[in-house]
Image: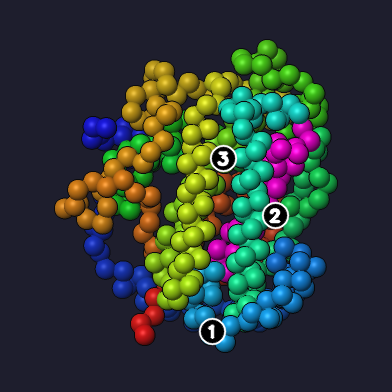
Amino acid sequence: MKEKNSSSAVVSETNSTTSQSSTEEAVQRHWQGVVKRRSFLKGLGIAGATLSAGALVGTEGNAQTTRSASKLSQGDAALLRFAAAAEIIEADLWQQYNELGGVQGGNPAYIAALSNLDGDMPQYISDNTDDELSHAAFLNAYLISKGEEPVDLLPFRNLPSSKATGAKDVKRLTNLLKLNVDLSWYTRYRSTQNPDFGVKFKGPFTIENQPAIPLNDNDTPPDQTQPVPPATKQEARMQAIANTAGFHFATIEQGGTSLYPQLAQRVTNLEVLRILLSIGGTEIMHFQTWSDKAGNAPPVSATDPVTGVSVTFPDLNSPPLGGEDFQTNLIMPEPTIFLNKKFPACSIIRPTKTMGAAKAALDALTADGLFIGQSKEFFRFMHTLAFEADLARREDF
């Protein structure tokens, strides 16, 4: 593919070789004022489960028999804790998608609308859900095996569920009802520019304040048909919800695609490095799948009958879009600048710069709208995990 400068990239070049010492010194100074982890957790009354109190009892009991005498460095433990928290959050949102649109999903109209993107969507949703659950369980079990604290987000499950047919009436960690889906990945991976060199991207269109799962049965009846194009306002509304989900799947997984190599650069222990690289590889597989399926979203416009907020999904292959910046089947990463402009362009995951990666990941999830309604304690807990992960440094032996 020929070299190009994406019209969707807003270039703001910075010197990639600028010293990070002043930033790191400031971080170290700030660290002196951070509340110590164990007292912080005790203050919140959190010293327990992985995904549930019962799950931890069984996990810790099994881990006792394989507990290693070798301790993790403080930095490695912090990196794994942040990864575990991210996976628990991912598992929570994927469980909501799976309840409604997975293989055993309980909302036929939502499944039909998702299947308009690809007939295998329910299977992929179920598989992605299983993967994230396995990541969360493994990371916490590994932390326990090393004598480290696992991550417990159970006290923060206080957000409401969807009221639509198929959704379980349980408390959630994440909110899928008012998403602002960052689509910058769509143009970023089609561009020859690299965000690690200060380039900022915007997506081909906007998805703001939109649900990615059905809200209730009055808004989107669960037994309605989902033709393409939709014939009624309710059919259009459900298709727009499914399209939002399709793009959100890719948005979530591209975050993990970058996060794991970013965290891996700070690791000391080779086994911890193996863990991060191995789990990170599955995130890349997820992103590749969802970036392909998102391009199949049927063009549609819909308006929330209550709020009046609207969304339009354009035909990405037709003017004023189309071409190499937007063509939907261009899902392989375009070669870009890597490490230094003196080197030839290289097809890579991006971004992968490690400075402030955990905080950037948390900020992205927050901007997404996933935590609308969450408590101050939740944000305090998560920011502490992110801060500790970003403090991690590879230690010399």
**Vertical arrangement, residue 186 with respect to residue 279, above or below:** above
Q: Which mark is residue 173?
A: 2
Task: Name the amino acid type tagged 1.
Answer: Lys
- Lower position in the chain sequence, tag 2 or tag 1: 1
Task: Name the amino acid type tagged 3.
Answer: His
Residue 223, x across and y down, in percent = 80, 23
Left or right? Give the position of 146 relative to 51.
left
Residue 320, x across and y down, in percent = 39, 19
Q: Secondary structure at mark 1?
A: loop
Asked if residue 64 can be seen in this view, the reply is yes
The residue sitting at the left extreme is 342
| Towards the viewer: 307 or 7 | 7
Residue 70, x across and y down, in percent = 53, 85
Q: How is the image coloured?
A: rainbow
Which of the two marks, 2 or 1, is nearer to us in this view? 1
| Towards the viewer: 105 or 298 | 105
**CA–CA distance in space, label 2 to label 1:** 31 Å
- Give the residue at x 70% y 67%: 50
Left or right? Give the position of 16 relative to 49.
left
Which quadrant is the N terminus positioned in? top left
- Give the residue at x 38% y 38%: 332
Q: Which mark is residue 248?
A: 3
Q: Which residue is mark 1?
A: 71
Q: Secondary structure at mark 2?
A: loop
Left or right? Give the position of 302 relative to 345.
right
**Vertical arrangement, residue 101 with respect to residue 298, above or below:** below
- Give the residue at x 45% y 24%: 316
Q: Which residues are magenta?
A: 81-107
**CA–CA distance in space, label 2 to label 3:** 17 Å
